[in-house]
Image (tube, helix red, strand yellow):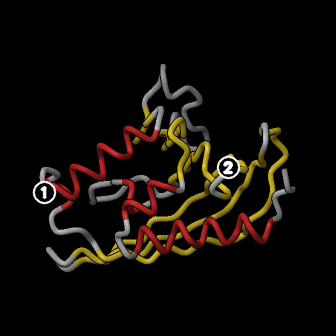
Amino acid sequence: MNPIHLNDVTNLLHLEAHYLDTQQWDPWLNLFLEEAEYWVPAWKSEHETTSNPKAELSLIYYATRAGLEDRVWRVRSGRSVASKPLPRTQHNVNNVMLGNETVTDGVQVLCNWTVHQFRTKPQEVEVLFGRCEYDIVQHVNGLRIQRKKVILLNDYLPAMLDFYSL
């Protein structure tokens, strides 16, 4: 397999942001492997997040892509009252770098992110920000996300929190 380069990983993260901002859910889901884990841990204290999504509280946790697929289905179907209407979002990904953790057939990627979102009802602007840890692997269809861990730094928000805001 070809080595994974930082530029290719950065392009993947920018593509993910674009798909979320343009509400292209199917291409966004296809960036994730079927066994991909998606996790937003809760905060234990001012500076420590939970460390085990199966035993401790999480803001969001899906053990596989099927959980994300179900969430997208709820948004599309209108069964997610909290997502009606969907906010307009702008994802910004920066400080992308390779991490030190070993990932089979891939790399660990670290980045910072900011999301500006406008909720048309009640006409409010919100800014969410944090850090992400990804495990990115080579797949027959190109680079794919095997794991995404989102550390939400400003978790005291008056808004609903969902995948499209992170």
Q: Is the residue 157 above or below the residue 34 in the image? A: below
Percent of width and height locating residue 39: 50, 41
Query: What residue type is disc 1 on?
Result: Gly
* Position of the C terminus by quadrant: bottom left
> What residue lies at 55% left-to-right and 50% top-to-bottom?
151
Percent of width and height locating residue 4: 81, 58
Q: Nearer the viewer, residue 27 or 121?
A: 27
**Farthest front residue in view:** 140
Q: Is residue 40 left or right of residue 87?
A: right
Q: Nearer the viewer, residue 56 or 99?
A: 99
Query: What residue type is disc 2 on?
Result: His
**Residue annotated with mark 2:** 139
Percent of width and height locating residue 10: 70, 69
Q: How many numbered dots are placed on residues in this image?
A: 2
- Secondary structure beneath disc 2? strand
Percent of width and height locating residue 134: 65, 50
Q: Is residue 104 left or right of residue 111?
A: right
> What residue lies at 39% left-to-right and 60% top-to-bottom?
26
Q: Is the residue 166 above or below the residue 73 in the image? A: below
**Residue annotated with mark 1:** 78
